[in-house]
Image (tube, grey):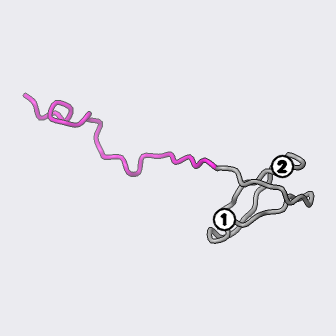
Amino acid sequence: MPRYDFRCRACGSTFEVTRPMAASGDPAACPEGHDDTVRLLSTVAVTGNAGAPAGGGGGGCCGGGCCA
């Protein structure tokens, strides 16, 4: 289940809420009890090269080693 970051406008605290994607837009109360919160935009870092093609060529004829 995804986690969403929120910030309280009243006290400035930042907190996470775990909920289904269908409820991602629902309001969330701050742990201090304030209702004036805003959902923060999260960034996702994707690393690795599982989808990268094999070989180190630069592509094209000259990068692939087919030129004589």
Few, some or many C-alpha atoms within 10 Å of disc 2 (few <14, some 14-19, many ≥20)?
A: some
Above or below, comparing residue 39 to residue 68 in the picture? below
Q: Tell me the magenta residue range.
A: 42-68
The residue at which mark 1 appears reads as: 24
Q: Is residue 62 magenta?
A: yes
Is 46 situated above or below 23? above
Left or right placement of residue 60 versus residue 23 in this view: left
Q: Residue 33 in the image: x percent, y percent? A: 91, 61
* Mark 1 or mark 2, earlier in chain: 2
Q: Nearer the viewer, residue 19 or 28?
A: 28
Q: Residue at x 18, y 36 (%)?
A: 60
Q: Secondary structure at mark 2?
A: loop
User: Which residue is rendered at x = 70% and y = 50% of the image?
Assistant: 40
The mark total stands at 2
Q: Which residue is mark 2?
A: 9
* Closer to the eye: label 1 or 2: 2
Q: Percent x, y for residue 49?
A: 42, 46
Q: Quadrant of the C terminus?
A: top left
Q: Quadrant of residue 27?
A: bottom right
Image side of residue 45 versus residue 62, left or right: right
Q: Is residue 29 left or right of residue 23?
A: right
Taking the view exactly as shown, the residue that stands out farthest to the right is: 32
Instruction: Name the residue type under label 1.
Output: Ser
Identify the element where label 1 is drawn: loop
Q: Is residue 25 magenta?
A: no
